[in-house]
């Protein structure tokens, strides 16, 4: 069985290795074109290594037979997010090239709408793909909120950290791990965060309109989380609030272990949505 597992993992390891190589290539390109500083290089490399390690571990536990086209799109998006992360880290030492930052972020946000469609069209939706997609989304929002917070104030970090705070609290309050019903409003609010932070980060808006736009985005996010938390509380003793490990989104016909399980949250724009 161990030999079969090792054999099955080879193409998956190849995919993650390609992703790590692409991340290094993007950082090298940014270094040549704009001259990344030490903070940008170290942060970008740390992001690439962490992504490679987490994805490799998740794939080993997922029993996926192939990486799949949707996950390739998400991996490409993760590479772009690594570039954005490096630029934002560099911005603490010197102003980043806004055009490059906006370009990388824009493509990453566009691809966010692509990977889900690819997964549905090819029939390759999976819990791992959904979680991978969600984590890339959440980290991009966190990085963008850090960048915008440098001009508007630390309160903007509430947007980027809210999802992580939710996950942390859910470890203490298991009923928060319940399965939420699909919601167009939730997806819209989640997508709006990235768009607003991108526009404000690009410096298109004057200070007061930028402040108002981010504040409205934050209020909508608080409303979305609050609505979901209220629903989870109301059904905490019912079947809809079963633990994520028993979620109907996971394949009930398989006894194989699942890699990444998706907690309920307002940033969950998944492949399977």
Image (cartoon, helix red, strand yellow):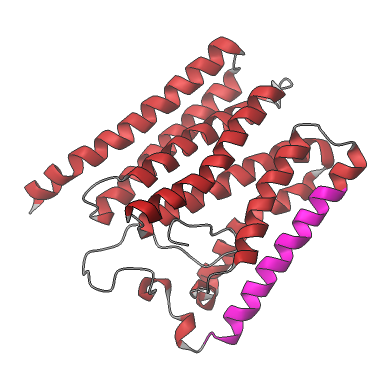
**Residue extending furthest top?**
32
Is residue 96 rendered to the left or right of residue 113? right
Is residue 29 rendered to the left or right of residue 153? left
Specify whether residue 124 is painted magenta.
no
**x and y, in percent, of residue 230 in the image:** 65, 79
**x and y, in percent, of residue 60 in the image:** 25, 49
The image quarter containing residue 243 is bottom left
Specify whether residue 231 is painted magenta.
yes
**x and y, in percent, of residue 192 in the image:** 69, 52
Q: Which region of the structure is painted magenta?
A: 212-236
Q: Is residue 242 above or below residue 29?
A: below
**Residue extending furthest bottom?**
237
**Residue extending furthest front?**
121
Q: Is residue 158 above or below residue 51?
A: below
Q: Residue at x 81, y 33 (%)?
A: 204
**x and y, in percent, of residue 7 in the image:** 12, 43
């Amino acid at each position: 069985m161990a030999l079969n597992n090792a054999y099955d993992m080879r193409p998956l390891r190849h995919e993650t290795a390609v992703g790590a190589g692409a991340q290094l290539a993007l950082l090298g390109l940014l270094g040549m074109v704009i001259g990344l500083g030490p903070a940008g290089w170290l942060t970008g490399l740390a992001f690439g290594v962490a992504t490679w390690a987490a994805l490799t571990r998740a794939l080993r536990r997922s029993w996926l037979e192939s990486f799949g086209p949707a996950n390739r799109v998400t991996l490409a998006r993760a590479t772009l997010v690594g570039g954005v992360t490096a630029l934002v880290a560099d911005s603490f030492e010197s102003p980043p090239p806004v055009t490059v930052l906006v370009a990388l972020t824009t493509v990453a946000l566009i691809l966010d709408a692509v990977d889900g469609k690819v997964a549905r069209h090819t029939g390759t939706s999976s819990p791992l793909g959904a979680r991978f997609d969600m984590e890339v989304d959440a980290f991009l929002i966190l990085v963008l909120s850090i960048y915008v917070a440098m001009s508007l104030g630390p309160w903007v970090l509430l947007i980027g950290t809210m999802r992580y705070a939710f996950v942390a609290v859910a470890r203490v309050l298991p009923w928060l791990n319940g399965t939420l019903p699909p919601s167009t409003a939730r997806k819209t609010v989640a997508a709006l965060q990235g768009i607003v932070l991108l526009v404000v980060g690009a410096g298109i808006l004057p200070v007061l309109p930028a402040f108002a736009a981010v504040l409205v985005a934050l209020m909508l996010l608080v409303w979305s989380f609050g609505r979901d938390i209220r629903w989870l509380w109301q059904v905490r003793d019912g079947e809809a609030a079963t633990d994520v490990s028993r979620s109907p989104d996971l394949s009930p016909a398989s006894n194989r272990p699942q890699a990444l399980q998706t907690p309920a949250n307002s940033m969950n724009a998944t492949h399977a949505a």
